Image (spheres, grey):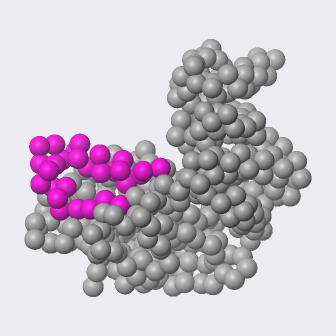
Amino acid sequence: MKKAVHFGAGNIGRGFVGLLLHEGGYEVVFSDVADALVDAINAVDSYTVHEAGPGGVDHVVTGFRAVNSKTDPDAVADEVASADVVTTAVGPTVLRFVAPTIVEGLRRRSPDAAPLQVMACENAIGATDTLRAEVEKAAGADAGDLLSRAVFANTAVDRIVPGQPADGGVDVTVEPYFEWAIETGAFDGALPTIPGAHFVDDLAPYIERKLFTVNTGHAATAYFGARAGIERISDALDDPEIAARVSAALEETSAVLVAQHGLDPADLADYRATILERFRNPALVDTVQRVGRQPLRKISRNERFIGPAAMAAERGLSTTALVGAVTAALEFDESDDEQAVELQQLLRTEDAAAFTTRTTGLAPEHPLFPAIHDAVVSRQTALRA
């Protein structure tokens, strides 16, 4: 039986990546650092992925186990050594902690084995490239030999997985819709078996379309909703003013996608409508607090707001609505989110120019800088009032 090792046994790992790997005929070995989660996975022989919303069905997942990478990294390396596929859903900033275990697995892998197929399934552009660079760094002098035992393919993944009930066990509730695009070039024709995934020659249009529409729209809804004191994402989009603001931001990102990739405006309009309808799904109990978490990451240079807004500004396109979303993000003040706390502290202690450069990566001479700088000044003025 084929085997896949998946780093990150959380809701996305079980409810999306792990499910599709299971349906592709892989035994799935989850690797995670959360003791209770690993124990809970190993205590059951199946779990159910519930699709909430129109057309949703239940999927029963079997043929899996979990290994604790915090207490037994050696066992995870052994699993990687004999795996066919390695995937991740840990967050882009955690990839550097996964890399050493992959390196050790490649070190133990037979040079005669088929190349390990590695895909980082993260909400970031070029996440697998990032993981490969971290693997190369961790491998040191052995990088050339060890990297020859693996292939690395970038992917674009999309499925809304809301926060789960505390008593839900390892079952996961997800939306029915999903997309998993995988670049083909790395595989030399030997593609992994992932039902429902589609393989493309050029991933850039897919990943930027997803990041600049789904992620931009989701986070914008969260920040505008939080500003209005609304709890649920679906309720936020029932507010006509919020819906108009989110739609305007996505119209600006679509203009960038047309200019950058030549995508069809009519197709993008349909895609935007589909995305907003997904966010309105009342069966997905998702909160603005969950979707808005980690605001510092979300306003960074290559992320969902500054990324497309910078591209738009460089082309002389409108950025008004995207800057409005960043302005709302600057107001996100959640005591339970470390980045939100840090964001508000930085706004109180740094001057506007230094803050803008630090958090967004924009140089003062960039055409987007003045508008973001003005938004920062506005937030700082409100905090000092």
In-image side of 147 versus 60 (left or right): left
* Residue depicted at 28% across the width and 80% down the height: 2
In-image side of 307 versus 324 (left or right): left
* Residue depicted at 63% across the width and 84% down the height: 57
Query: Residue 29 placed where, x, y %?
Result: 34, 71
Q: Main secondary structure of the magenta part?
A: helix
Please tell me how many numbered marks the rendered image carries: 0
In-image side of 256 versus 197 (left or right): right
Instruction: Mark yes or no: residue 326 visible.
Output: no
Q: Is residue 126 magenta?
A: yes
Q: Quadrant of the N terminus?
A: bottom left
In-image side of 126 versus 27 (left or right): right
* Residue depicted at 77% across the width and 18% down the height: 381
Query: Residue 276 placed where, x, y %?
Result: 74, 61
Give the image quarter of residue 102.
Answer: bottom left
Instruction: Mark yes or no: residue 115 visible.
Output: yes
Q: Nearer the viewer, residue 194 or 174?
A: 194
The answer to whether residue 114 is above or below residue 262 is below
Q: Nearer the viewer, residue 129 or 298?
A: 129
Query: Residue 176 placed where, x, y %?
Result: 64, 75
The answer to whether residue 362 is above or below residue 209 is above
Q: Quadrant of the C terminus?
A: top right
Residue at the farthest top position: 351
Query: Residue 125 placed where, x, y %?
Result: 47, 50
* Residue depicted at 26% across the width and 62% down the height: 151
The answer to whether residue 112 is above or below residue 232 is below
Q: Which residues are magenta?
A: 125-153
Give the image quarter of residue 141.
Answer: top left
Q: Is residue 146 magenta?
A: yes
